[in-house]
Image (cartoon, rainbow, N blue to C red):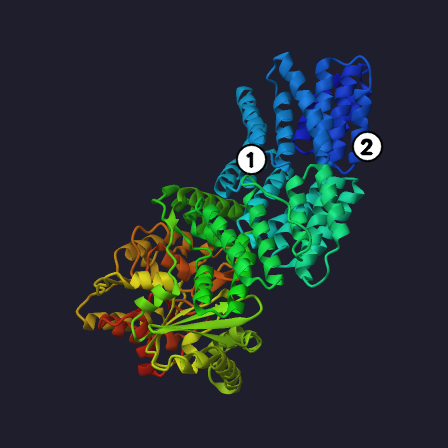
Amino acid sequence: MPLSAIELHRRGVEAANARRFAQAQRALDAASARTEDPDLRARIDGTTAYVLAQTGEPASAEQLCRDALGRSGLRAETIAVLSGQLGTLLTHSGRLVDAEAELTRAIDTLTAAGDETTELANFLMNRSVVRMQQRELDSCIADLRRAVAVYEANDDEEPLAEARHNLGYAALLGGDLVTALTLMTRSRPKLAAISDLAAAISDLDRAEVLRDAGLTTEAEALLEQVATQFGAQRMRQARGESEFHLARSLLRHDPAAAERAARTAARRFTALANHGWAARAEAVRLEAQQRARPRRPIDDAEFARTAKALDRGGFRTEATALRLSARRDGTGRLPRLDDAAPTPLRLRAQEVRAARAAAAGRDRDALRAAAEGLDLLTAWQQSFGALDLQASVAMHGSDLMFAGLAAAARLRDPAILFEWSERARHLSQQVAPVRPPRDESLAVDLAELRMLRAELAGADWTTDARVRALRDRVRERQWAATGSGGTRERWGLAEATAMLDADVVVLSYVFTGSTLHAIVVTSSGATIVDLSWERVQSALDGLRADLDMVALTRGGLMGEVTARALASRLAILDAELLTPLLLAAPTAARLAITVPGALGGVPWAMLPGMSGIAFTLATSVSRLLAASARDRTRPTTIGFAAGPRVPRAGGEVARAAAAWRDAGREPRILESSAATVAAVTELAAATDVLHIAAHGRHAVDNPLFSGFELSDGILFGYDVDLIPRVPTIVILSACELGRSSVRWGEEALGMTRVWLHAGADCVIAAPVAVPDDVAGELLSAVHIGLSEGAAPAVALAKAGLDTGLSAPFQCHGDGF
């Protein structure tokens, strides 16, 4: 017996909701052919309109919906449903004002009927999207919560998951990234069970969270993936939205690529006659163009035309942001903002004020605007505690920081430049995180991630769906569990000089984005030294490759060639970065160095002028001096761990352990199968000095997924945060674990930083490969110094002199 039109329509609705659009269209065509009922036909046409809109025919969809509404003999409920369908179509086309009117008409009609139906909840969901895009977040959240209540009452699990996901998106727009990721991560499994496209839509929104959190590498990979999925399903609107968000993510770090992506998205939206979204993409293209070619005159007419189109579409926040950017050149008046404006928009306003002041030669005004913006960012950061999130959201302050550093450099006042150097060091550490309590569920997820990492050895494990789901869950647990412990104190120049010992000299390097400077600070005063960024940059280009090659090709003709090339680069860096500064402080016995991300790869210990000098790479001068005020105790408990597949690890550990035995202390040693993640973390919690010899794994996209290889898998940075008490001194003898990923110009985050964040005073690590015999001999000599009571930096410097070895091991944190 053939199915009735009603049953076919029901099946079509189910298929459409599951994003199985071809199946839905077949069912709807069959339903339409089997009914003469005008009311049912109108409902069928409304669902067909939704399918047409999703598959790239928005104009046909809208016309079909309007034609259905124009028929006579429709019930009030059907008119409400069609109005809601039309409102949804108008939402997708970017006509937000008209969309809200139609959806409100539908909601009011269904509410008056007294039925708390799934259709009512669907329209509440759709109206919440309109209000989201208009940044009317209070009314948006009210709609979503009402929809959640209806779905719960009707046991509609799938749309309930979508509603909770959308609450996460509202949290994202409100700046609450932790809640956003939590809600989206917890909703995704249910959405993924509906269909691959439902999962892709979820991933599109989660990519926005990652982007706003500054995790752009991961966000962009996800956006490219979902754009491909939408393209394969001919979902041109959704594909365009993916390209639009990709352009927004690229904007700060690759404006040329952002301009190309935004232009592609704008063409796609224009072809769909979606003028509101086309204006959004065009706004990003103009922003990218301005960043890629900052000296190009601003086309006022083009900016104004696009801003008006955004206003017409209801995208008022984006229109205001574009009008701010149009005034960056100092012309015209800035649009007014109130305290309720979104934080990123208020930050943009301060960026523009700083740029206008700098262009007019008012550097002190530029400093004031930049400082006010960074204070606003700090207030936002106080809602975050997790290390990776704090480091990443610094993205939103990078332009302000560079504006302030450049203005401070032009003023030539050592006190002001020192203040801004410290601001730069504190950009992602101004708020002191509170380490979370041990979370057994997090530990279980990390263990499963280790197993998958081993299973996928040799492949790009980051693309595996299971890995991605686990990484999201790990991050969500960490973000949600970690609190914030107030702001850290920054010290000024006068306080720093008063606190410095007579034999300690601070070298604070400052990169403004185009120029390089340094402040030499002693107990008697401070001096600014201008440096050549062009010559330093030329020596840095290819430096890492030379360091790696020298470690791999010792001896022989090739070894001699690469050694000479490396020596030449190091000589240039020594002459440009060190010699001019030491001339200003000839009596320096100990150096505290702070560096911007641009200098993060310099192997300071290998510079000729550093021979015999104890130095430490401090996270900031303020934190170093605050730490130096604490009482230091001599280490009494020592631990060693040797990972698998490191031929020299056993010998290195044995030689280093002998130094402590000679000093009357018996170290604990974990080797071979005994060196598990659980055993090493337990060892870390029970020792003052921990030395790990293992293969390192550095994850550029999220360094907290960096780690070292133990007998049962990778010990991740997230594992370190689960250790209740960490050693005072950590030595990482692994070729990659000293590396950091430069984050937004001034900040770096790597395994060294993870251990320092967890509570270690000092981490000794190398940013590049070190020959096995060199690492073994040098670090054994370091342990001799430590066992005799020497500070880590002093022990490392003496080891270099005693052995005659030049290696890139260096102290991070407080090496004194």
Residue 293 lies, with reference to residue 199, above or below; the image says: below
Assess whether mark 2 and mark 1 are in contact (beta carbons under 8 angstroms). Answer: no
Res. 663 visible in picture: yes
Residue found at x 74% / y 44%: 278
Q: Which mark is residue 250?
A: none
Kind of residue indicated by mark 2: Ser
Which mark identifies residue 165?
A: 1
What is the total number of numbered labels drawn onto the structure image?
Answer: 2
Residue drawn at 73 percent across, 50 percent down: 303
> For this view, does 417 lie left or right of residue 95?
left
Residue 757 lies left or right of residue 327; in this view the side is left
Seen from the viewer's position, the closer of residues 4 and 28 is 28
Answer with left or right where residue 608 lies relative to residue 539.
Answer: left
Determine which quarter of the picture holds residue 627. bottom left
Quick one: label 1 or label 2, which is nearer the N terminus? 2
- Which of the pair 565/774 is nearer the observer? 565
Would you call the spot at circle 1 few (<14 residues within 10 Å), some (14-19), or many (20 or more)?
many
Q: Secondary structure at mark 1?
A: helix
Residue on which the image places disc 2: 60
Query: In which quadrant will I find the C terminus?
Result: bottom left
Does residue 641 appear anywhere in the picture?
A: no
* Percent x, y of residue 516: 52, 71
Given residues 556 and 97, the one toward you in this image is 97
Viewport quadrant of the N terminus: top right
CA–CA distance between discs 1 and 2? Answer: 30 Å
Look at the picture and state if 560 lies above or below 68.
below
Q: Position of residue 426 (x, y in %)?
A: 43, 58
Task: Check disc 1 and give the amino acid type.
Answer: His
Residue in view at x 70 percent, y 15 percent: 77
